[in-house]
Amino acid sequence: MKKVYYKSKISTIALILLLTISATLVALPAATAQEIEYSKTTYAYIGAIPNPVGVNQELLLHVGIMDFLRVSHHSWENLTVTVTKPNGETETLGPYRTDATGGTGGLYIPNQVGTYTFQTHFPEQTYDWEGGVSRVPFTGLVLYEASDSEVLKVLVQEDPLEYYPGHSLPTEYWTRPVDAQLWERSSITGNWVTTPTYLFAPYNDYAPETAHILWTKPMEMGGLAGGDLGSHSMQDGDAYKGKFSSSVIIGGILFYNRFSSGFQGGMPQKGIVAIDLHTGEELWFRNNTRLSFGQTFYWDSYNYHGVFSYLWETSGSTWHAYDVANGEWIYTMENVPSGTTVYGPKGEIYRYTVDLENGWMSLWNSSSVVSWEGSWTPEGRTYDALRTYSDREGRFEDVGGIAWNVTIPTDLSGRVLRVVPGDRIIGGATTGGSSIGWDLDSMEMWAISLKPEEKGTLLWQEWWQPPPGDLSLSFRTVSVEDGIIVVWAKETRQHYGFSTETGVLVWGPTLIQDYLDIFGSRYVYADGKHFSIGMSGIVYCYDITTGKLLWDYEAPDEFHTVLWTNQWHIRPLFITDGKLYLGTSEHSPVDPKSRGAAFVCLDIENGDEVFRADGLFRQTDWGGRAIIGDSIIATMDTYDQRIYAIGKGPSATTVTAPDMGVPLGSSVMIGGTVMDISPGTEDYALTARFPNGVPAVSDADMTEWMLYVYKQFERPADATGVPVKLEAINPNGKYVDIGTAISDGSGNYGFTFEPDVEGKYMIMATFYGSEGYYGSTTTTYLTVDPAAEEGDLASLEGSVSNVEDSMSNLTTYIIAILALVIIALVIAVYSILKSSK
């Protein structure tokens, strides 16, 4: 795992300050010919943080006057700041435009050591109060007189200031909530609110590199039916059932639908389940609700700054928002327009509606339905998503979500292919209809600008003559970042690349893919690479800018259980952290199911396997497939109808040494265990089989071990454990490197150690972690007694000799006594026999 350290900058402070102002700033209303009702003295100000500051470090300036304005998006204009440097040079900063509070912020970097001076200059200007407000003693047009601030001195020193040092990423198992001060962990605390564009989830700085299971939870009865039904299994959600579909991860909680979606006729049962992604604990369940997607939305206004998270249920144009913490209803929007859905930079839900027939397009913003400004308080309300009006003071009461509506050309055909907010919409089709089909005369593509100054402008429109052969063409990746639109020709199994700037052909055709890819082909995109994966089970990775094949990958079916190909028919799940995850799925699998379905993680740079888990997690075409959040994968498995969480788990290391002192010069055995203490190991099904705990195993053995632990496969005969570093601090305070032990398949380890100093040793045992487990450490203590002295040994030898002599004499005495007894018995017997005669 990469460790990230935060380097604080004044720009962060500036950002926080600037976020307190209105996001929308417009020019001050122009003064009309009306008379000035009042002339007001103003008081300009200047502030600087920090003071003193280090040379070449950022200085945050606070610039403005002490008078506020009536409407949040109004501002004072053209303020400047005069800077005098230690060497006498001057410079002018600005012009600045304030927010409605009368102030604003700016950054300045001093490059000389010494004393700087700063002074704000406010130019005369007018403002119309239009009838006044309760906090202002006048109405009408007011003249605000020019003013200069006091001169501020700032000491710039040679030594840099220290800022908050930041925090490293966790090296042990972590859970939610994550303290808001740990900013650096944003890179590993990702959410999955909906299936991302081209399955690229860039917000996970670490993604699992083994198939280690954290916990598992049944969705419903699954697995082998058994008995008279033999090898057939319970129904698993393939072919129109849609189990685990629309699943969401927000704030470390997994949300999924309890019941199938029922593509053919629907299901009367509805319900959302909330599971702690890190522990597997069920948090709540809501009946009569179906999850469609999620949202994490940052509300940023002059009154409030914070993230609001929602679960959305949609039914046609009606949307209901629910609280992620408890499932309670929050608010509803009605009349939501249709269109292409895109998440905005702050998590807003945008809907771009493009009417090619009537020549217009619009942008609907979900957040604007509630408010354009101020506080975010939608609780308990139902909004008309299209309604708009404002009061006389310009404050929006019920604005509706249509941000803009513009005209577009009417000679375009097809559909929207990709929306890049603030940049462009790209679309295309054949000249004969709205979709690309076979027997084409030409293929059309076009682009419309979304830039503020040219919304609705046609950037380009292009037609392309396909090769002969009645090809079925379809659009695949549209990467504006790389400037390429990828088109797939089904019958020839080839790709073509077109420019997003002009629509002309850039490259193609590519090589011919396996013939099985005509029966279904999926695609993903990330980091300048286009990945094509079809029913052949072969992954083809192309350079999207050139069409060159970079690498390909096959997942062989070594036991030949698939009946139409030699590879597993893997499909793309998602890309994150430079890794492509793929899983086996089918439209309607034959039962009994083929065994050993592949779940694969590849390095996208070279196609190398990071890990492959056969038989652990089988996906589904019709339900939800694997998703990721908080660096943990959640997936449904159609072999046993359970949900699995995959990721690094916690470990527990123990160490023992002899409880009694040992003489110097003796060897001792240092021993202990390393165990997997993931939440799933607490289930009775595992504690009954592993009463002493579940051993931690090597990454190389993880897949087979997980099959044994969680799926009751045969126990691997040669599974190895993990390395344990053994160290000591001797009685003199000196560090001692004892060595490294490897735990066995039962979790135990042992290491022989010969202390060389008498006294008390502190023994430390550390498992530094692996891709499957976070590390753990512990200590114990060992006493080494003095060695036996030579005199003591001689005395001991003499004592032993005396004992031996005594034992020898005792033996002689016993033998003599026994001889006398025997003689006496012989005489007695003889006397008795003689008397009897």
Image (cartoon, helix red, strand yellow):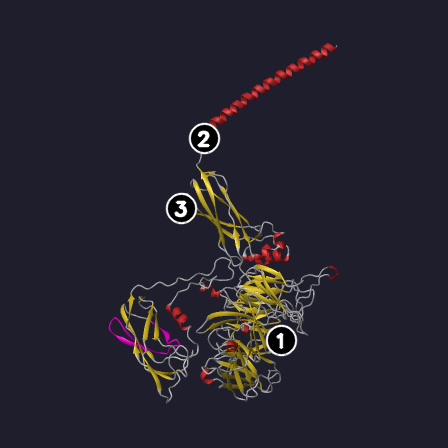
**Are the residues flagged by discs 3 and 2 in contact, CB closer than 8 Å?**
no
- On screen, residue 214 versus residue 764, left or right, reads right
The amino acid on which the numbered mark 1 sits, given as a three-letter code, is: Ile
Position of residue 795 relative to residue 195, above or below, is above
Q: Nearer the viewer, mark 1 or mark 3?
A: 3
Residue identifier under label 2: 793
Are there few (<14), some (14-19), or many (20+) residues within 10 Å of tag 1? some
The quarter holding residue 355 reads: bottom right
Position of residue 777 relative to residue 202, above or below, is above
Q: Nearer the viewer, mark 3 or mark 2?
A: 3
Residue 752: x %, y % from top left:
50, 44
Task: For residue 698, say whether it is visible.
Answer: yes
Residue identifier under label 3: 734
- Disc 1 or 2, which lies upstream in sequence? 1
Q: CA distance from mark 1 to mark 3?
A: 69 Å
Q: CA distance from mark 1 to mark 2?
A: 89 Å
Q: Nearer the viewer, residue 393 or 320?
A: 393
Query: For the magenta stretch, what is the residue range?
Result: 80-108
Residue 706: x %, y % from top left:
59, 57
- On screen, residue 164 versus residue 677, left or right, reads left
The amino acid on which the numbered mark 2 sits, given as a three-letter code, is: Leu
Residue 518 got which mark?
1
Q: Nearer the viewer, residue 300 or 718?
A: 300
Q: Nearer the viewer, residue 667 or 452?
A: 452
**Are the residues flagged by discs 1 and 2 in contact, CB closer than 8 Å?**
no
Instruction: Label 1, secondary structure: give it.
Output: helix
- Disc 3 or 2, which lies upstream in sequence? 3
Q: CA distance from mark 3 to mark 2?
A: 31 Å
Residue 100 among magenta residues:
yes
Instruction: Label 2, secondary structure: give it.
Output: helix
Are there few (<14), some (14-19), or many (20+) residues within 10 Å of tag 2? few
